[in-house]
Image (tube, grey):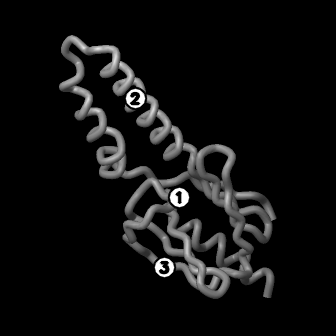
Amino acid sequence: MQTKTYKTRISILIMCILVIIPAICLVPLSQAPTPAQITVVSFVLLTIAIIIASIFSIKYVIDNDTLRIYTFFWMHTDIKIESIKKMEPSRCLLSSPAGSLKRLAIHYNKYDVVYISPRNQEDFINEINKRRESKE
């Protein structure tokens, strides 16, 4: 079977919380900054850049019998498709490899769960189910 890649859905709300709020905190530091304030501003801007890069790098790759969840460019988690017990919509606020609060809870192995947010959840679920059925 061919490899299918799904990008994460990106929520305006999450981007606001993670980017705009820290940026607003920089406004008072913009008038006659001291060297210490310049250091703080640089650190906050670097942090915002890393947050944006990490959100836009999230993707979900279905490759043969494995779901591979990529986060922050090089890190990934592998889940055997046959180990997936169920998938259900979720709005869980736990930290997860998802750029949106419209999430999909994937229960796998005995007690494991991961929350993801593929842009096209229906197509993603259909593809996982199709591959699970082909293994039976």
Mark 1 vs 2, N-terminal side: 2
- Which circle marks residue 97 in the picture? 1
- Which circle marks residue 45 in the picture? 2
Q: In front: mark 1 or mark 2?
A: 2
- Are circles 1 and 3 on residues that touch, CB within 8 Å? no
Quadrant of the drawing holding the C terminus: bottom right
Quadrant of the drawing holding the N terminus: bottom right
| SS for callout 2 | helix
Percent from the top left, x then y, of residue 97? 53, 58
Q: Which residue is mark 3?
A: 88
Percent from the top left, x then y, of residue 104? 49, 71
| SS for callout 3 | strand
Mark 2 vs 3, N-terminal side: 2
Q: In front: mark 2 or mark 3?
A: 2
- Are circles 1 and 2 on residues that touch, CB within 8 Å? no
Mark 1: amino acid: Pro
